[in-house]
Image (cartoon, rainbow, N blue to C red):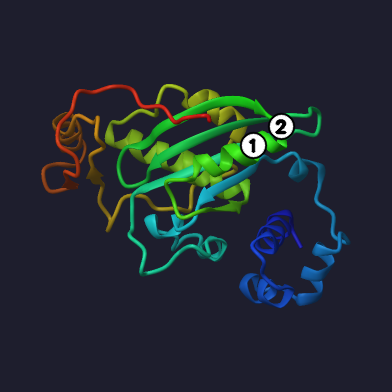
């Protein structure tokens, strides 16, 4: 079993899945799953150095996973009854094997249009502080789920690349936060936008007219969808609380 499958087994086990359910989901033998859970299968040093990552529950409904269907199984929060939003939150804790504290960074993604709306630069945190921070970080969502670093990279770097093609650069602290996440291993299998086009939903401090002008230059008048959710307000830079 390769490193990616070993990581997926452990992620699904953290979600409370049985060994048989994990085996069915991943298409592997139940004996192999039990071996991973019992520590008989070891992960290489490079995999152990991977950051720990979490994404809000229900994230998979905001993107097109046709190119990576195996990742949909890692999102038990997906439900047709839930409201679909274009916002995805990603939290990353860098390897802490050499220190008592992990370097923790975060990203708020608009996976339908703007890419990286907010990025939290790395901050050192012990496990207790990280646990509390994680609860606050995802408080606006219906919980959170652990995901492999490969998936988190695809979301973050893929959303950033999609937005850049449309003319939108990542938030100012993106580079510092991305250093904790690491580099993607290959092309992103996730498709962004909604129904094949950029879909812009304004935030409370956006400039909708400026965004619309940028989209028209990139894809033309008929190349995107737009929904105004907030009245126009004075603009200011947003930040997420680190309570």
The correct choice, above or below, for 230 with respect to 59 in the image is above
Residue 5 shows in this picture? yes
Query: Which residue is the site of mark 1?
Result: 130
Q: Residue furthest left?
A: 221
Q: Position of residue 202 (x, y in %)?
A: 23, 39
Residue in the image at 53% along x and 65% along y: 76
**Which residue is at the front of the view, 41 or 90?**
90
Q: Quadrant of the N terminus?
A: bottom right
Residue 23 vertical position relative to residue 97 in the rendered view, above or below = below
Q: Which residue is at a point 23% across and 44% down the rendered structure image?
A: 201
Residue 74: give x, y in percent of width and height.
Answer: 57, 61
Reply above or below: 18 against 118: below
Q: Residues within 10 Å of mark 2 (few under 14, many from 20)?
A: some
Q: Is residue 187 visible?
A: no
For residue 126, the mark is: 2
Q: Quadrant of residue 30?
A: bottom right
Task: Estimate how packed mark 1 is, as few (under 14), some (14 to 19) or many (20 or more) residues with alpha carbons within 10 Å.
Answer: some
Q: Secondary structure at mark 1?
A: helix
Residue 127 left/right relative to 241: right
Cβ atoms under marks 2 and 1 closer than 8 Å: yes
Q: Nearer the viewer, residue 18 or 62?
A: 18
Rendering coords of residue 47 (x, y %) = 74, 45
Q: Position of residue 233 (x, y in %)?
A: 18, 28
Q: Residue at x 34, y 49 (%)?
A: 86
């Amino acid at each position: 079993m390769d490193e990616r499958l070993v990581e997926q087994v452990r992620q699904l086990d953290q979600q409370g899945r049985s060994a048989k359910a994990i085996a069915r989901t991943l298409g592997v033998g139940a004996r192999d799953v039990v071996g991973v859970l019992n520590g008989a299968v070891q992960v290489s040093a490079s995999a152990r150095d991977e950051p720990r990552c979490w994404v809000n529950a229900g994230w998979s409904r905001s993107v097109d996973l046709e190119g990576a269907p195996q990742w949909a199984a890692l999102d038990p929060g997906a439900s047709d009854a839930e409201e679909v939003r274009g916002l995805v939150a990603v939290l990353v804790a860098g390897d802490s094997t050499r220190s008592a504290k992990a370097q923790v960074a975060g990203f708020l993604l608009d996976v339908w249009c703007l890419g990286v709306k907010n990025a939290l630069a790395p901050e050192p945190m012990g496990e207790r502080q990280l646990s509390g921070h994680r609860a606050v970080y995802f408080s606006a969502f219906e919980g959170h789920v652990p995901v492999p670093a490969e998936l988190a990279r695809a979301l973050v770097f893929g959303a950033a690349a999609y937005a850049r093609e449309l003319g939108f650069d990542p938030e100012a602290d993106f580079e510092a936060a991305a250093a904790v996440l690491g580099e993607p291993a290959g092309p992103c299998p996730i498709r962004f936008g909604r129904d094949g086009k950029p879909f812009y939903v304004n935030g409370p401090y956006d400039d909708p007219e400026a965004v619309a002008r940028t989209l028209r230059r990139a894809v033309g008048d008929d190349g995107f969808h737009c929904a105004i959710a907030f009245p126009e307000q004075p603009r200011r830079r947003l930040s997420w609380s680190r309570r």
